[in-house]
Image (spheres, rainbow, N blue to C red):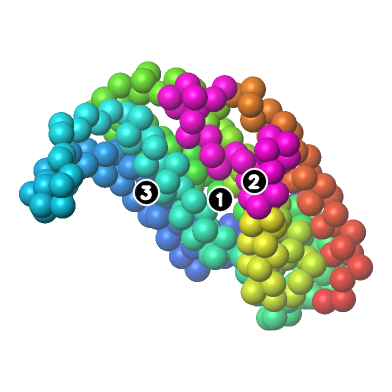
Amino acid sequence: MKSFIAFFKKEVMESARSGKLILLGILFFLFGVMNPAIAKLTPWMLEMLSESMAETGMVVTGVTVDANTSWTQFFKNIPMALIAFVLIYGGIFTREYEKGTLVLMLTKGLARYKVVLSKAALILGVWSAGYWMCFAVTYAYNSYFWDNSVAKALMPAVLNWWIFGIWVCSLMTLFSVLTSSYSGVLLGTGATVLASYLVGLLPKVKPFTPASLMNSGGLLVGAESAEDYIKAVAVACAVSIICLALSVPILNKKHI
């Protein structure tokens, strides 16, 4: 256990020294501020465009914004934050392979499963911290400007997207031990997410696909219920556990 904690602390310190934690912290914070800011500025922007739109025959009437407008923006922006996260942490294993630092740690007696668990814990921890910080900032501003109670099923929708991010983190871990290249991790993770999305276009399969968790915005207006996503949540959690479980034996057999 001591070696696991020591290696995990090393990972955290390296992320901090490299500026990754600061960069992602700023990024998630900015996205959290942008959501209510864009909602607040929407009427002003439409008013500015009203004259040019009128020339094309489009009439702009009074626009009412509320907390749901901001939360809708939250679900539009968080995919960009997740993409940035994957790009920044996609090389968490592969850089170790390239530099040979992992070999040094293993020769000193560090078990390979502890490498997988510590790096996976870091990825999951950073994603969770960033995501919930973005949520907290948006929630605070929405409470100040409007009333968050208009969002009918806010927490189930937010939890769905967090779980989707956890699933993506588990894919990053799996492809990090399957391939030795940064591009391989990005391609593998991206291709799996895309495949899940495409398969989800089939009505009978959609309730089971993790990618369907990205479309949780309908919960905010009562168009859907939290029960509609239970199967997708269960599949995403199960696949995440399987990915992490498979990563250990794969790394054990991998020639580094």
Return the residue found at the far front.
57
The local secondary structure at tag 2 comes to loop
Residue at figure coordinates x 36%, y 20% from the top left: 150
Nearest-to-viewer mark from 2 and 1: 2
Find residue 164 and report its image quarter.
top right
Residue 110: x %, y % from top left: 82, 63
Return the residue found at the far bottom.
99
Residue 54: x %, y % from top left: 11, 47
Residue at figure coordinates x 87%, y 63% from the top left: 250
As rendered, which of 117 and 195 lies closer to the eye?
195
Task: Inspect the image, locate mark 1, and give the three-letter code of the amino acid beneath it.
Answer: Val
Q: In terms of sequence position, does the residue under pointer 2 or pointer 1 come before the other?
A: 1
| Residue 126 tag number | 1
Q: Which residue is mark 3?
A: 31
Q: Which residue is mark 2?
A: 201
Task: Inspect the image, locate mark 2, and give the three-letter code of the amino acid beneath it.
Answer: Leu
Q: Is residue 87 above or below residue 65?
A: below
Q: Is residue 64 above or below residue 83?
A: above
Q: Is residue 28 shown in magenta? A: no
The answer to whether residue 52 is seen in the rendering is yes
Asked if disc 3 and disc 2 are in contact, CB closer than 8 Å, the reply is no
Q: Label 2 to label 1, Cα distance in Å?
A: 31 Å
Task: Inspect the image, locate mark 3, and give the three-letter code of the amino acid beneath it.
Answer: Phe
Q: Is residue 215 shown in magenta? A: yes
Per the rendered image, the range of residues in magenta is 196-225
Q: Main secondary structure of the magenta part?
A: helix
Q: Label 3 to label 2, Cα distance in Å?
A: 29 Å
Q: In terms of sequence position, does the residue under pointer 3 or pointer 1 come before the other?
A: 3
Q: Is residue 101 above or below residue 178?
A: below
Find residue 160 and report its image quarter.
top right
Residue 39: x %, y % from top left: 26, 39
